[in-house]
Amino acid sequence: MTRRILVTSALPYANGPIHIGHLVEYIQTDIWVRFQKLRGHDVVYFCADDTHGTAIMMRARQEGRSEEDLIAEMSKAHQRDFAGFDVDFTHYGSTHSEENRELCAEIWGALRAADMIVEKEVTQLYDPEAGMFLADRFVKGTCPICKAPDQYGDNCEKCNATYSPVDLIDPVSTLTQTKPEVRTARHLFVRLEKMHEFLEQWTQEDDHLQPEVANYLLGHFLKEPLRDWDISRPAPYFGFEIPDSPGNYWYVWFDAPIGYMASTQQWCKKTGRDFSLYWRNEETEIHHFIGKDITYFHTLFWPAMLKVARFNLPRKVHVHGFLTVGGEKMSKRKGTYITAETYLKHLDPSYLRYYYASKLGPRQDDLDLNLEEFATKIDADLVGKVVNLASRSAKFAVELGLSNRYPEDGGLFDHAAQAGEAIADAYESCDYNRAMRLILELADAANRYVENAAPWKLAKDPDARASLQDVCTVALNLFRQIAIYLAPVLPRMARQTEKLLGVPIEAWSDAGRPVLGIPVAPFQRMLSRVDRKEIEKMIEDSRETESAGSDAQYNDSDQPLRDEPLAEEITIDDFAKVDLRVARVVAAEDVPEARKLLKITLSLGGEERRTVFAGIKQAYQPEDLIGRLVILCANLAPRKMRFGVSEGMILASGSGGREVYLLHPDEGAQPGQRVH
RNA sequence: GGGCCGGUAGCUCAGUUGGUUAGAGCAGGGCACUCAUAAUGCCUUGGUCGCGGGUUCGAGUCCUGCCCGGCCUACCA
């Protein structure tokens, strides 16, 4: 039975380039789409740029151009990058389109009609100079709980407290460095709770979600009433104005998923198709591929919106994990924040497609790109085993062509043909790493066959030409089966195989019938071994790109400053209030119940001792601290904690967790000395 | 604190509803081959399946407690 399938990948935000982290998703989706097409299904694959929101507006302002100009450029760059990795969309649209505006209005109307929209006052900080309300991350100030300076508007990284930006002490707008004022505005909210029962059912039934995702939703959101969803933003905002609420705009997360539909609509208009066949027809399967960070938009809000507006619900939302490189988050400093563009300058996209395929499973686990493994996997699996099959047998077949009848091969071809269903099951369930393993087993068996048949010996015997032809016929047909099974992952290799044998690869079932009595073209290299030097160059390039503009000699990243902009200016008197002292760690012990804390006893010289709880457990061993000098903020108000009273704060930089770097004075400093 | 996922060979991972001596790839060692992009084939080293209990004729697999790692979430400070 032919299935009609509509597939989407999440819409990349038009605020930055595509990088190898994004590509996990687009490659995963593209493989699934190509697989379904090969199986003979009617598949369309839509995506678009996500263009709205404050971030785009701010960036356009900064660069002194219009938002339209910015997003046009990003869209072009994104599409170029995707094409470079053989990600083949049916249509690539934009959320900033008339089609999207109309669909937003339609769904909005349905939400209104269902009495799901309410208006509420929201008190927010407003930057009069920028003329806009400030989202939480555009405000910094002193934490109202622990008095830590430089904290974002919604929570404190130091003490983990959550609060409203209105409660911040000395708030500063990060846009203009001025002091914002408190203003109230009327926001529109979606009463999601009205759909509670529906969502509880939809998320738990029919395999719509991976089990861990369904559990997560049940445990975190659905166990209590769903909160109203703040769906409007006051002007100025780059997006669509809400038709029945002038001055208010739809929040970017309202119109972003609707962009899937708008992209479909654009394609339908272009090609004369029927939109309702895809979004208002129960027989169409809709599959969304997304990252785990946006799970709840796609599994709660989105199905609720579709349900209310009577559109098709997703058949399945496939959630994948994040990419790490060498076991760590991508880092510009380490050169592992690799853009699609930089990758393509150095390496073959097929490498990454295969590597991701060999690591991707059906669950939302994070995926690690280990560059050493990357290189050995490509070399061993693809070059050494798969391509090698063709390259070691094709040259004997050029003169002879393939036999007219399929020779005895000990059941190898039939076995591989039968394996096709298990491999297909693995692709279908997004268990690509299993599919790759199964395919590689076939390549192993085929190489063993060639080894035993020894065509190179037959080639020396003029009387053995028939046998030689038979051996090549088997080897090349086994190779072709593998090329077909790998075609979703490696479309280029499928094309090369077509050229080699002069027969098109059009369907999965082609792997069930051998090709016979045909000429064989001279073998041309299909894939090169991975050049380790290019990997290094790629890393180097990725480092350079982000350090451009900084002092050439040191290449320090500007990321820390961007993460945490400079604070408001202070006077020397302000500074003098802070009493910093050199102190010696005389004891340090683990606080077993705490995840981050070490209990540290400091000496300020003589008998003066201080006990401080410091959140550095993940970065330092207690025994390594004993004896060393640190800098202590000595006049900080004592703070009662669960484990005791903390009498100060040890100075350190870094983002927390393992990234904590204690300050220490140069040689000669004495405990108790004040730092001026 | 709560939730989810994981912990199997040096590394990356398979292990189907509990059923013989726990597997693969890579890496290591040896041999063979020399058609192929120093590719391939054969042999081989290597595992108290995180730890402790329990259920069972039988546990990597089921139950339970704990330890470790990742992610999520909350609170206290």
Image: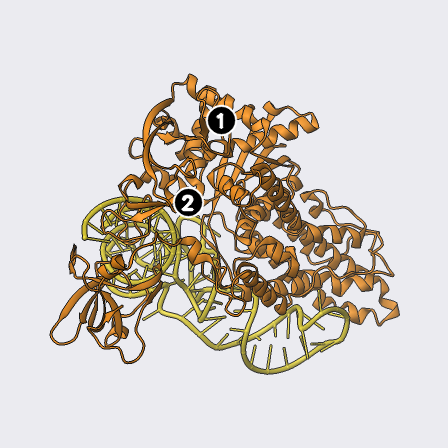
Which mark, by number, is residue A176?
A: 2
Residue A438 appears anywhere in the view: no
Measured as percent of width and height from the top left, residue A536 is found at 59, 67
What amino acid does circle 2 point to? Answer: Thr
Comparing A90 with A66, the one in front is A66
Find disc 1 in the rendering and name its residue: A241
Query: Separation of disc 2 and disc 1 at Cα?
Result: 25 Å
Q: On screen, A467 above or below A233? A: below
Q: Is residue A214 left or right of residue A24?
A: left
Measured as percent of width and height from the top left, residue A268 is found at 65, 27
Dot 2, crowdedness within 10 Å: few (<14), some or many (≥20)? few
Q: Is residue A2 left or right of residue A563?
A: right
Quadrant containing the C terminus of chain A in the rendered view: bottom left
Report the chain holding disc 1: A
What amino acid does circle 1 point to? Answer: Glu
Look at chain B in the picture and name its colour: yellow
Which mark, by number, is residue A279?
A: none
Q: On screen, A629 above or below A543? A: below
Comparing B22 with A289, the one in front is A289
Comparing A290 with A611, the one in front is A611
Quadrant containing the N terminus of chain A in the rendered view: top right
Look at chain A in the picture and name its colour: orange
* Residue at x-position 57% and y-position 44%: A29
Comparing A117 with B17, the one in front is A117
Residue A474 appears anywhere in the view: yes
* Residue at x-position 85% and y-position 54%: A519
